[in-house]
Amino acid sequence: MDNPRSAHFSEGMGGGRRPGAVRVGIGYDTHRLEPGRPLILGGVEIPWASGLLGHSDADVLTHVIMDALLGAAGLGDIGRRFPDTDPRYKDASSIALLAEVGRAIAAEGWALSNVDAVLIAQAPKIGPYVEQMRGNVADALGVDVARIGVKGTTTEGLGFEGEGLGMSAQAVAMIEAAGG
Ligand code: MG
């Protein structure tokens, strides 16, 4: 019986995971900056007077990459997977959680095509650390570093990022059916 409220897209096995299938996901996150906290971005501790506030290490760049990957695979988001009410994730290394996300996605039969992420922050400049960040993300996911994009931008002093109150990040991820 036709469901008038359903669009009837054709659905392959396993939520569309047929050979050659590709999926995309998006991640967005914001953390507040606080004096005296360590600043960890893409698994790199950057010398800076303030760092991001959060239950885990508050690595906003790695958080958005996880959310993009989980979204692409239809596996929810990091808030559901690693709840901040769970003491196991207090000060957790986000890069270690990213490895866990990578394993979960692989277990569903997906391979990573690529990830591209942007950090929105007035300061510090992340250029000198970008290659190390890409390497950390690639290692956690077990992929070639060429599949990982990381960049930074300012907001020309506008908004909470521009005023140095916080940092935000965005990422997109594309995954493909493994072996497809
Ligand atoms: Mg976060």
Image: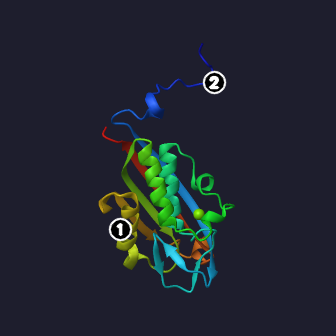
Q: Quadrant of the C terminus?
A: top left
Residue 76 in the image: x percent, y percent?
57, 47
Residue located 52% across and 85% down the image: 48
Q: In the image, is 109 to the left or to the right of 91?
A: left
Give the spatial CA distance, label 1 vs label 2. Answer: 45 Å
Q: Nearer the viewer, residue 21 or 102?
A: 102
Residue 104 in the image: x percent, y percent?
47, 49
* Residue 99 picture quarter: bottom left
Q: Is residue 95 above or below residue 180?
A: below
Is residue 158 among what the camera can see?
Answer: no
Residue located 37% across and 73% down the image: 132
Residue 165 in the image: x percent, y percent?
63, 76
Determine whether the residue tagged by mark 2 lies in a helix, strand or loop.
loop
Q: Nearer the viewer, mark 1 or mark 2?
A: 1
Determine whether the residue tagged by mark 1 lies in a helix, strand or loop.
helix
Say the numbered circle drawn on residue 16: none
Residue density around tag 1, few if under 14, some if 14–19, many if 20 or more, within 10 Å: some
Lower sequence index among marks 1 and 2: 2
* Residue 148 picture quarter: bottom left
| Amino acid type of the residue that numbered disc 1 sits on in the rendered structure | Gly
> Total number of numbered labels?
2
Quadrant location of ligand 1? bottom right
Residue density around tag 2, few if under 14, some if 14–19, many if 20 or more, within 10 Å: few
Say the numbered circle drawn on residue 5: 2
| Amino acid type of the residue that numbered disc 2 sits on in the rendered structure | Arg
Q: Quadrant of the N terminus?
A: top right
Residue located 66% across and 61% down the image: 86
Residue 110 in the image: x percent, y percent?
40, 44
Is residue 147 among what the camera can see?
Answer: yes
In this view, the residue farthest toward the front is 88
Q: Are marks 1 and 2 in contact (CB under 8 Å)?
A: no
Per the image, the residue denoted by label 1 is 135
